[in-house]
Amino acid sequence: MKLNRKDILGIRELSVDEIDLILETADSFIEVSTREIKKVPTLRGKTVINLFYEASTRTRTSFEIAAKRLSADTINISASTSSVVKGETLIDTARNLEAMNPDIIVIRHGAAGAPHMLAGILRQSIINAGDGAHEHPTQALLDMMTIRAKKGRIAGLKVAIVGDIAHSRVARSNIHGLTKMGAQVCVSGPATMIPRGIEKMGVVVHMRIEEAIRDADIIMMLRIQTEREKQNIFPSLREYAQYFSLNRKNIGFARKDVLIMHPGPINRGVEISPDLADGPHSIILEQVTNGVAVRMALLYLLTGGTQ
Amino acid sequence: MTLLLKGGRLVDPSRKVDGTGDLLIENGKIAGSGGGQQQTGKARGKGVPPGMEVLDLRGKIVVPGLIDMHTHLREPGFEYRETIASGSEAAAAGGFTSVACMPNTNPVNDNRSVTEFIRRKAAECGLVNVYPIAAISLKSEGAFLCEYWDLKDAGAIGFSDDGRPVMNAALMRRALEYASSLDMPVIAHCEDRNLSAGGMMHEGFVSTEIGLPGIPTIAEEVMVARDLLLAEYTGAHLHIAHVSTAGAVRLIREAKARGVPVTAETAPHYFTLTDEAVRTFDTATKVYPPLRGAEDRDAVREGLRDGTIDVIASDHAPHAQTDKEVEFDFAESGITGLETSLSLSLGLVEEGLFTLPELIEKMTVNAARILRIPKGTLADGADADITVIDPKREWTVDRGLFRSRGKNTPFHNRTLKGKAVLTIVGGVIRCRDC
C-alpha cells in the first residue's frame, strides 16, 4: 500500500487505513534504531529541511535523526538564525528553500495554518511538526504507535487527556486520531482550559481530574504553559498543581495497568509528580523512542515508499 | 447634457415606486419620470431631440444611486492599499454613487484639515460622492472628543472610531450627546477589546478544531448592549456598524421596540459566509468582526428581513498583498467589498428573503436618512445619481479585475447573479457596462 498524499498536515484528514499504514510502517522501522550501524540507504540522495519557527528539542532532533537513519541529507533552520530576523516573510523563505530543490520540508510554526499555506504553494511535501494550537500530527501518531505497542490495540481503550486542552495541538491531534481508531476519549481541566464545543469532537468533558481518569487505560498529561497564568487561564501554579496534577493519590482512580504519557517537556511537580513521571506506569521515554520510527515512516512513505 | 433612460423597471423606495417607466435627466438633476408610454417633461413627443442620449433599459432595473455608508478609502496614509481615486473607481464599478469613508487613516480624520483633504481629493477625481466620517475621539484613542462642529462645517457627516472601539463608556456618552446637538449620528464599532483580545476568528466549534484563538459573540454584544443603553439614556442617534451576531440582532430589535433611536447595518460577508470558510486558513476570510456561526448568519438575515437591520454596507476594507500573504495570525483583517456588495445582496432577493424594493431601500434611502444626506431618491429635482442593474447578468468574481487596489476577497471565483451595468452620478455616466 502507498500513502497517496503530498503532505501530512493533520490527523483530521487522515483515514483509519492511512493511520494503520503509517503505524505499521513505523513498527517496521523500530528495528533500524537498534542496530549497531543505525542506517539504511532508503532515502539516499533525498534532502529534508527542518524549518523551525518555534523552539523544539524533541521534535526537531527526532526528525533529524529519522532522516539521517534513512540516509537523507538534513538541514536545520531555526527562525532565530535565519533571514526571518531580517524581516523575510514565510512565503519568501519557503520559495527560496524550494529553489534549492529539497524533497521534504518539515515545519513548526506558532501560527495555526502556516504549514497549510506552504503546502498550497510549494511542490515539496510538507510535514506539520506543530502549528499553533492546531495540530501536531507526528506526536499523535507516535502516541498511537506507543499505545498499540503496549496495549495491543487502541479500540475500546479509555484515554484521559488532562490539562490545557484549549491551547494544545497535541490534544487536538490525539482527539482526532484516537477517536478515529475507536478509543473513548475524555478531557479534563479547569473550564478556562476547555474550548467551546469540544464535545462535538467526540470527547466527554470532566471538570475534575479524578472523574476523568477513573478506570482509564491511558492518561495523557499536557504541559502547563506558565505564561497562561498572566491571561487568567489559571490563578497560580500552586493551585493547579494541587487540583489538576497527576499524583500518587489520584492515580488510584485509574486502572491498575494504566499507562502515563506526556508529550514533553514535562514540568515536574506541576502537572505530574516526579515519582509518577519516572515510575513503572510511565511510558514517556518510549514515546520519544517511537517518535523516531514514526517520522522515519512518514519520510519514507511521502517519498513514494510502499509498505 | 440630457439623458433619457427608457423602459426600465423603476424602483424608488423613497417614494414607494416600482414599475416600468422612463427617467429623464437634465443638467445633473432628475427632470421627471413616467410610467410606460406616458413620458414626461421634454421626453414627450416624437423623435429624439438633439443633444439627448436615449438608453433602452428594457429588462434592467433603475434605482436611486446606491450608497455605501461604510468604506475605507485608506487615504491619507495607506495609499498602497487604496486611494480616494481607486476607491471611487471601485465604487462606481460596483454601482455606488455615494460612499462614506471611515476615519482610520493616517493621520486619523479627527480635524478639519483631514476632512477637507478627503473632500478635495474626491472632488479632483470626481467620480462619486465621498462623505467623510470623522473620528469620535482625537486620534481615535478613546480619550478626548474632536471638534465636531468644525468637522461638520468641513463636510463630515457622522462620527466613528471604527476599528478602535470606544472602551470608555463616559466618553461614548459625551460623544452621543455632543453629536446629537448637531443632529449627526455616532457610528459604533461594537467590540469589547478585553473580550476579543488575541482573537483571530469567531469563537466556536471551528476555532476549537483548528486552534485559532476565538473572538466570542459577547465581545460584540456587551458593547451593543452598553451603547443601546447610552442611546436610550441620552436620546441621541446611535448607528451600529457591521452587526455580526444573533445576540446583537436581538438586542437591537428589542431596543427598537422600546423606541431607542438606533439604526444598524451589516455587511454582505456576514449574511453570506460562516466561520467554516476559515478552515482553509485563507487570510481573505480574516475580518473584524469575524465571520460568525451559521446561527448568527441566519439571525443577521432575519434582522435584515424584519427591518431590525436598516442598511447593507460593504465595510470595504482593501489591503495590499503584503498585508494578507502572511500567516493567518499576522494578516491584516478586512474584506474588499465595493465591487461584490450589490451582487451578493441581490442573492438575498433571488433566495426570496425579501423583495427587490426592500433591498434597494437598505442600499439607498435608509443610508441617506441615517447620514442626513440629500440622496437616495429618484424624485423630480433630486441629484441625478442613478444605478442601473441587470438582474440576469451572471458573472464570476475575478479579484484581478477589481478597480480597487485591494484584491482581498473570499468570493474570488464565485459566480454571482445580477450586476450594476450603469452608474450615473450627477447626471454623468461614471461607469458603463461595469
Image (cartoon, coloured by chain):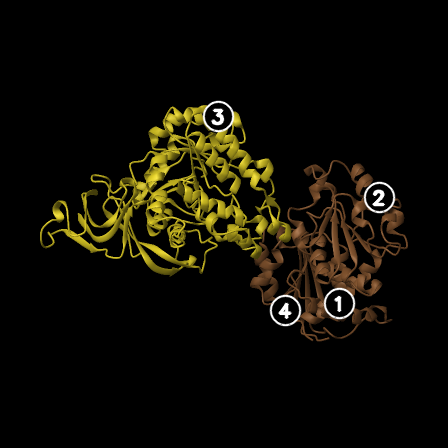
- Residue A46 relative to residue A151: left or right: left
Q: How far apart are marks 4 and 3 (CA)?
A: 58 Å
Are dots 4 and 3 on a single chain? Answer: no
- Marks 1 and 4 share the same chain: yes
Give the chain letter at badge 2. A
Q: Where is residue A258 in the image (x, y as percent from the top left)?
A: 85, 55
Indicate the colour of chain A: brown
Residue identified by numbered label 2: A269
* Residue A5 marker: 4
Mark 4 vs mark 2, CA separation in Å = 41 Å
> Does the CB distance between marks 2 and 1 fall below 8 Å?
no
Label 1 marks a residue whose chain is A
Query: Which chain is indicated by disc 3?
Result: B
Mark identifier at residue A23: 1
Q: Which of marks 1 and 4 is nearer the N terminus?
A: 4
Residue A187 in the image: state x and y as whole percent: 74, 49
Please state which of residues B359 and B110 is positioned toward the viewer in this rendering.
Answer: B359
Earlier-in-chain disc, 4 versus 2: 4
Q: Name the residue under label 3.
A: B173
Q: Which amino acid does label 2 sit on?
A: Gly
Disc 4 marks which amino acid?
Arg
Label 3: which secondary element? helix
